[in-house]
Image (cartoon, rainbow, N blue to C red):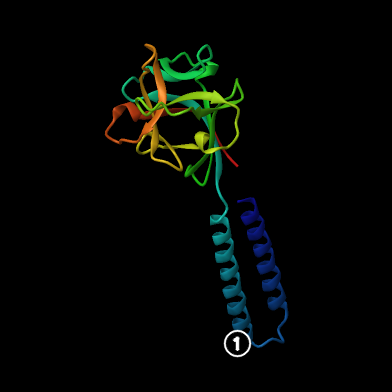
Amino acid sequence: MRVYKAFLFRLCFAILVFVVFFCFDSSRDVGSTIQVVESRYELILKRLDALRESQKSVPRKGTITGYFRPVKSPTKCMTYAPEINAMIISTCMRSPNQQITWEYTKDGEYADHFRIDYQGKCLDAGLVRPENDYKPIMLYGCHGGNTQRYSYDRTAKVIYRVDDTRCFDYTTAVDSNDTRVASKGCDLRDENQKWNLEVISETFH
């Protein structure tokens, strides 16, 4: 946008100089002057079109910090439990272990990662448990691998893995009574995979 404004400023200045020059140069033929103006105008339009296309091709990057609330339980939030290194569902207290930062590019099509800022680590899908085919979500050092590359669809309200057909789900773990967050096969009919994002802050760069 800054480049675009600078270009428009230079364009207006050039037009002003051009008009002043032709107003004071009476030796020029009116017809030829009109032709020159028209050709310059067409060139300017082409340059503007090229500039717009180049702006479209630049990936948009953004950072959102907020709370993910289960649609079925709006008073609860996705929460990091450090004692078990797992993401669980608990009452929203607006605490640091519930604030999740999502960094993305291309209008959210691809996620760089989700992270818990106070830990400086990323949400990561652990090893597959064959007995029920779910991957518990834990915190791990950010490495940009596929187990950390998730995105959020604001319309469908699902958090999904960008290279797979798995979504964030919350369910009761087989070895405890905790309501844990896990990565499971996406099912848009499953309300346990629906999340609302309460945005605290959002920036674009």
Q: Is residue 155 left or right of residue 42?
A: left
- Closer-to-camera residue (121/165): 165
Res 92 visible: yes
Q: Is residue 44 above or below residue 52?
A: below
Q: Nearest the camera: 48 or 165?
A: 165
> Residue type at mark 1?
Gly
Give the labeled residue for mark 1: 31
Taking the spot 52% from the left edge, 28% from the top edge, the residue there is 123
Q: How many marks?
A: 1
Q: Crowding at label 1, few (<14), some or many (≥20) Cα neighbours within 10 Å? A: few
What residue is at 48 percent from the left and 19 percent from the top? Answer: 86
Image spot of residue 16 (x, y percent): 68, 67
Is residue 203 shown above or below 89?
Answer: below
Q: Is residue 7 left or right of residue 191?
A: right
Residue at image point 63% right, 54% down:
5
- Residue at the far left: name it: 189
- Give percent across and percent down for residue 158: 38, 34
- Front residue (pair 115, 166): 166
* Local SS, label 1: helix
**Image spot of residue 110 (x, y percent):** 50, 43
Which residue is at 56% across, 49% downward? Answer: 59
Residue sitting nearer the eye, 190 or 84: 84
Q: Quadrant of the C terminus?
A: top right
- 170 lies left or right of 5: left
Q: Is residue 28 above or below residue 159?
A: below
Residue 75 picture quarter: top left
From this view, report whether residue 141 is shown above or below residue 154: above
x and y percentages locating residue 199 in the rendered image: 47, 29
Residue 200 seen from this side: no
